[in-house]
Amino acid sequence: MAKFIEDGTRYHLEDPCIAPNSAAYLWNKKMMLHMNCRGFAVSQYMDPEPRKYAHVPNLAAQSFMQPEQPYFSHHPGRFFYLRDNQTGEMFSAPYEPMKVDLDRFAFEPGLADIRWVVEKLDIELSIRLSLAVEAVLESWQVTLRNLSSQRRDISLIPYFPVGYASWMNMGGQYDAELNAIVCSSVTPYQKVTDYFKNQHFKDLTFLSASRLPDFYEVSQQAFEGEGGLHNPSALQQGGNLNNGEAHYELPAAIMQFQYNLPANGSDVLNLSFGPAKDKAEIKQLNQQYLYAEPEPQRQASEAYFAQAKGCIAIETPDQQFNHFVNHWLPRQVFYHGDSQRLTTDPQTRNYLQDAMGMVYLKPEACKQALLTALKQQKFSGEMPDGILLSEQAELKYINQVPHTDHPVWLAIVLNAYLQETNDYSLLQLRLCWADKPLEQSVFEHVSKAMQFLCEAKDERGLPYIAQGDWCDPMNMVGYQGKGVSGWLAEAISYALQLWVPVCEHLGEAALAQAFSQYAEQLNQRINHYFWDGAWYGRGITDAGKLFGISSDKEGRIFLNAQSWAMLCGAASGEQKTQMLQAIDEQLDTPFGVMMSAPAFTEMRDDVGRVTQKWPGSAENGSVYNHAAAFYAASLYASDEGERAFNVLRKMLPSNAEDELKVRGQLPIYLPNYYRGAYYQYPRTAGRSSNLFNTGTCAWYYQLVVEQLFGLRGTPQGLLLRPQLPSDWPKASVVREFRGASFDIQYQQVSGGSAKPISAKQLLSADEAKLTITQQADGKLLLSGFVAGERYQIRVIQAREDKASQAVAESALV
Amino acid sequence: MAKFIEDGTRYHLEDPCIAPNSAAYLWNKKMMLHMNCRGFAVSQYMDPEPRKYAHVPNLAAQSFMQPEQPYFSHHPGRFFYLRDNQTGEMFSAPYEPMKVDLDRFAFEPGLADIRWVVEKLDIELSIRLSLAVEAVLESWQVTLRNLSSQRRDISLIPYFPVGYASWMNMGGQYDAELNAIVCSSVTPYQKVTDYFKNQHFKDLTFLSASRLPDFYEVSQQAFEGEGGLHNPSALQQGGNLNNGEAHYELPAAIMQFQYNLPANGSDVLNLSFGPAKDKAEIKQLNQQYLYAEPEPQRQASEAYFAQAKGCIAIETPDQQFNHFVNHWLPRQVFYHGDSQRLTTDPQTRNYLQDAMGMVYLKPEACKQALLTALKQQKFSGEMPDGILLSEQAELKYINQVPHTDHPVWLAIVLNAYLQETNDYSLLQLRLCWADKPLEQSVFEHVSKAMQFLCEAKDERGLPYIAQGDWCDPMNMVGYQGKGVSGWLAEAISYALQLWVPVCEHLGEAALAQAFSQYAEQLNQRINHYFWDGAWYGRGITDAGKLFGISSDKEGRIFLNAQSWAMLCGAASGEQKTQMLQAIDEQLDTPFGVMMSAPAFTEMRDDVGRVTQKWPGSAENGSVYNHAAAFYAASLYASDEGERAFNVLRKMLPSNAEDELKVRGQLPIYLPNYYRGAYYQYPRTAGRSSNLFNTGTCAWYYQLVVEQLFGLRGTPQGLLLRPQLPSDWPKASVVREFRGASFDIQYQQVSGGSAKPISAKQLLSADEAKLTITQQADGKLLLSGFVAGERYQIRVIQAREDKASQAVAESALV
């Protein structure tokens, strides 16, 4: 059984074997912890670059988080062995490393903590993990309960492997003063300059406990012995830990606590685990967290995560969707916006889109991100590949490869910000350029970015792709300086069309006119150069070859080239019909819409690195949710609300065991992809990357607010034009908007037709201190509302396409 | 039980639990394989940089080989599960991953192969591993024997994990045409330039078999399941492998072979494992090796390793020592000289000293190495930090840090070359400089190197240490440009003294005079600035502080500063007595002589990175064998032959179980260190690094030849002056020298005193076509011999210091 509990604020998984790699994540501003249901963990913190305090047992590469992270028995994790000292029987919680069948297992990730409840041998182990809000610290609380009617002699042995920290120096010992196992290391380096750079490193990893351990061990090998982690030698035959140290040996923090529990008795153990610079810091952390009152800490932690509150609370017939949208989606949006994915040089497009999500949670954060990004813009209008968030930060990895799409996102994100806040004053703020000490307004910055996009074109007027656009690894289409991107042409057209009304709003009519004309020209070129008969091609290579077309054996159709053709208005109604059919036939799967198909199975060296990724993984034909979200956006923009919701809904696994098995993920976050290559590799299709870093969530949230529930801001007020699925008779939403609260009840009146409602349908509303006006395009405009007030509105929609009625009633509460 | 077998050409270990990490190694010019007795493996090949074809289960760092390499259940290895299909009973060979108690276990590394014999369930598994000579390929031969009198139904399941090769692309499948499991990957990269650089990569890893597998599996996880590697789900309850593939899943090459063996019947399976660029290469490798006659391959392999033949064959009362010196030591020397430690930019000092070892095996290799190194010398005389062995090679890691000792080794190695070969014509060869197209002779190159050493000095006339000397991580003594090295002063003095006779030999009297004077001045300065009352300090920091002295709490005494003071003649007899006492008291341990003591337990930032290494590991106070070999050299140079042999002998573990447990290594190679910090961390003292890359072996071999057996070349002939341990009544050696063979019988006549013989002792010899003359220093000179001839000589030494007699008899055979 798997399900949401506690009104959707917590998930409950009863079997560790259904989706062994399913996980939850916690974070604060300084760290992130990806915690697997079985006890494996991936954690890192910023110092200022990402660092680990628990390691694999070999010298690992410094890299980004891996999709489909493989786990293995010696992978870092947090485990608890439990032994009945009278019988010698043992099990381990949460499940690894012993993997003993449990009488009860519950993995229960919440918004602010992660819980397990495990029962075996008439012992219940309740484990709660949370993070300190301000420190890099895991707080563990373990409650042991004797479920039997006999007194029990029990050993509880937390086993927190620390792993291979350094070939220079690693070890560990028990420190009586700190009541902690303290593992030390020296981060490997060779150059004397690095010695000074590394001074601040937290090279200690510690596990401190709220009570004295009866025994301990710090040498992983001494603990494991010949028995193996599934049956450690140190715990066999009633043995106790040997109080051993690790001297340039793999360290692990292992403590043994003896409990003598009366019938139905219980006891609580608190542990702190994390990195530290020195013992003084451990002492201070112990004081501040381990020995401090737990309740204020719990409240602080809940308060931190409570910031992950979006601008809507929904109630629909789809309970799982409600829980996700009300709690888990804004949580994920907040994670992105608040932690910057724990990188010091986020890719510009990621940084901007993550900021877009914050529009609906904390618009000020979006504003600051826009300003940070624009300060790094060049005077030419070009945006850098990554945004540096600290002075020490450098452009790394993929940010050393030139991509051409970055300016596009400025208009898209700024549009979202302006729609939500109406804060046009942002456009007047003045900023310097990265390469010129000349202050110009945000409006001028973004206009220059748009101008830059318009100018980086070839003789056909098509935008160069250089070594990639949104699709990072599409790096060889244009690396010789000639190839162009069809998708980018569409994206520029779309961005310009979003920027034109802003220009108009500021009275920049000439600019508006120029951008508008250019967008129109682009749309013509898109149709001229990229339309392939039933869908749009993805780009034209350095050698002049259109690809992503019907004559291609692999990579015949790319989703983005279709979605954005709809978004930018290049596609006619007839073209849309053909495209949608092609998408349905070639890209749609039960697990979502694939980004391209067929996935490349061999290198195509005029397309690039994307074709070398495993077929169906990541950008090579997976159900790449970010692209799926773009597709949903384009469907909503094309009045295809039914399809659009279907796309969004498929991004979430259901609770059904069969589906959890295939997806390998719980419906508490959107992964960056599910495996695609549905027709090529059916066995693995649908499997989650289990990576929760993704631009998807910002778009998803925007679409739910502005399209599904149809509540989008304009300079005049709140525009109302829902596109609810036809099988929802009712739905409601509380929408926070510019300080006012809108409590909206939707009702869909059966009209005998399953067609989605159209924008032409009639709407009306009871009014109270609220002006509801119907616009020429059929949308309703709510205006005249007052911040601090709460409005109740009823919206009735008939689902027939003819004789439809929509009634909006509002009442001041 | 552990012992040498087959006349010392093979070792035999009967218990996999005595020294679990003990290992043997095989190599060819293209690859290296470090094979653990339990089945774990570290292997790499050159392409041209070192690469792996079997990986750990996570993204590993590209790094050098790690000391004390930790193993864990999912570490790469080569394993064989065996199941009795009638009973379902299983075990694994060699020992991991099941770690079932075996009825018989033998790990038997030989010179050219590695063997195991394992018995359990009345089945014998004989496993033989060898490497192809010309290809990157492991050849496995498994012989299954039914030891029972019943017909047996058996499954043999080779499990060769391939691991996490890439986040971009990894997978694998069975290829029927090749009868191989072929795992594919794309080496991760981001930049388009790397795509072109990586074109040649062997991104496939394959396991091909000599017969059809009945079943197979390529997904590691599908094989392991919930059971774990110690009890894989796929093999439980009589199940057979599922013929599964790995699709962006951890790949493993797993085949299941069914055998129906009659009573006492047997069968043989051959397997090939390695990397390949494409299937064509696998096909070709299969043809050339797997399907080819085994005997010629075995001969080729033996012929390759037979090149590892030194210039002596010894017979002493110390059988283990004989085996080591006759077979395993020259093998290790040859490994270094022939494979360049599998790096493309060996450190200059390593490269030169490895070449020194080749003097006694293949002098031509030493000559070529000297020329290669000198072509990279700067016109200033300075030597680079690393020698680039290919055009693509770059200076990496530690070679980017400036060290000041490199020219020293030129004189030392060239001296060894000239002594052995008398090939003074080498000195006339003309070479350009790295930074100047001017051809000058080898003699001029080396003289200029010596000149450079003489000039890089401060106002006191002491040589700068910059960011390290021989001791790489002693990087902060002089990083501000002021600190000096006491050891380097000694080493320069020593090098000059070796170079002076060469100058004289070439008639360069003025140069000889100048260098000789400078050496003398240096010796005075050494005594003036570094003598600390009972031993020499190691250096003077940037701030002017002498360290390595009695007032230091940690790092009070450094072995090298004493050894080289003896070598260079700076130390008087009285000083030597004091130093030896200090060494005995502070540095000597049952496992060898520590390089310094007490080991640093915290950073000393005027000494540097060495103080941050784990106390007792590597350069921070381990028994660092390279330094111990220097010490032995200095003892022989000081007529302390008894002590010297003791130092050499301690580098080899005995066969005793207790000692093997402590050392964790078999006596088939010299490790770069054993743990020191004997008084600080007694539990781990003596533990081997299990790294066989070390400059030790060249020195060890030289000392055995030239000092222990006292057979050193001069321009005039072969100088004879043994320093045998007093407890050897007899010993003999066959010495190959300049084309002639010397069969020498040593006899030590008991004279009542345990004192080592002195050079003053009388020696005489039967002569036949050989002139034996006694020199002024008491040494005997064998001259007038003819290449191609074999001479028998008897040497009798009395062990008393008075009335001693030495008789040398020679006879033309």
Image (spheres, coloured by chain):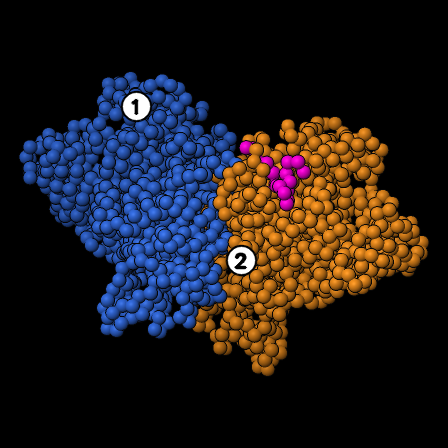
Chain colours: A orange, B blue
SS type, badge 1: helix
Q: Is residue B447 above or below residue A417?
A: above
Is B644 situated left or right of B530 in this image? left
Residue B130, percent from left and from top: 29, 50
Mark 2 sits on what residue?
A: A682
Is A341 situated left or right of A762 in this image? left
Q: Quadrant of residue A326?
A: bottom right
Residue B394, percent from left and from top: 44, 33
Q: Which mark is residue B442?
A: 1
Residue A689, percent from left and from top: 58, 54
| Chain hosting mark 1 | B
Badge 2 amino acid: Pro
Q: Main secondary structure of the magenta part?
A: loop
Badge 1, how many Cα within 10 Å: few under 14, some, many 20+? many
Q: Which residues are magenta?
A: A527-543
Res. B30 visible in picture = yes
Residue B632 versus residue A689: which sits nearer the camera?
A689
- Give the residue drawn at x 58%, y 51%: A622
- Give the residue drawn at x 23%, y 55%: B4
Q: Is residue B261 above or below residue B666?
A: below
Residue B360 among magenta residues: no
Q: Which mark is residue A99?
A: none
SS type, badge 2: loop
Q: Is residue B231 above or below residue A380?
A: below
Residue B466 versus residue B291: which sits nearer the camera?
B291
